[in-house]
Amino acid sequence: EVQLVESGGGLVQPGGSLRLSCAAAGFTFNLSTMYWVRQPPGKGLVWVSGIGPSGKNRVYANSVNGRFTISRDNANNTMYLQLNSLKTEDTAMYYCATDSSGTARGAGTQVTVSS
């Protein structure tokens, strides 16, 4: 059974930073492409970033490119998302997922960017 547990969200001012973590279990993490998706208030799921099994290949949505950094630690079955230069429009529930549409995702961690 796939288990994904996100953490690290919180309330931050515009321009601030956060680091999200995703602890994975129940599948072969080091062979899996992983994703971050988010859901802004009142809107649907939106793909944010993806990382290949080795961590070498990384892709980002245009809206976060240059501000967010995805990474992974295969030894500890954990994925990360570093959020820098946060904007109010980054406010959302953030999920890690095993597919880009977020169908198989965890419970999420809330990120709120507000002054």
Image (cartoon, rainbow, N blue to C red):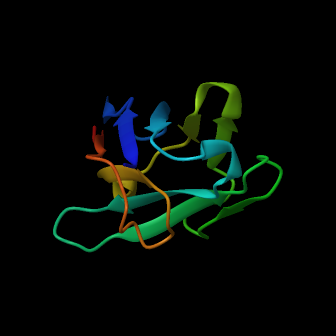
Q: Position of residue 86 (x, y in %)?
A: 47, 45
**Residue 64 visible in the shown view:** no
Q: Residue placed farthest to the left in the image?
A: 42
- Residue shown at the point (69%, 26%) measured from the top left: 75
Is 52 situated left or right of 12 in this image? right
- In the picture shown, does residue 74 fall above or below 41? above
Q: Position of residue 107 (x, y in %)?
A: 25, 46
Q: Can you say which quadrant of the picture contains the C terminus?
A: top left
- Residue shown at the point (48%, 39%) measured from the top left: 15
Q: Position of residue 30 (x, y in %)?
A: 68, 44
Q: Tell how many labels.
A: 0
The residue closer to the viewer here, 102 or 82, is 102
Is 12 situated left or right of 33 in this image? left
**Residue 63 visible in the shown view:** yes
Is 59 situated left or right of 12 in this image? right
- Residue shown at the point (43%, 73%) measured from the top left: 101
| Quarter occupied by residue 113 | top left
Q: Position of residue 47 (x, y in %)?
A: 48, 68
- Residue shown at the point (83%, 50%) measured from the top left: 56
| Quarter occupied by residue 32 | bottom right
Q: Residue placed farthest to the top in the image?
A: 76
- In the picture shown, does residue 69 fall above or below 65? above
The residue closer to the viewer here, 110 or 16, is 110
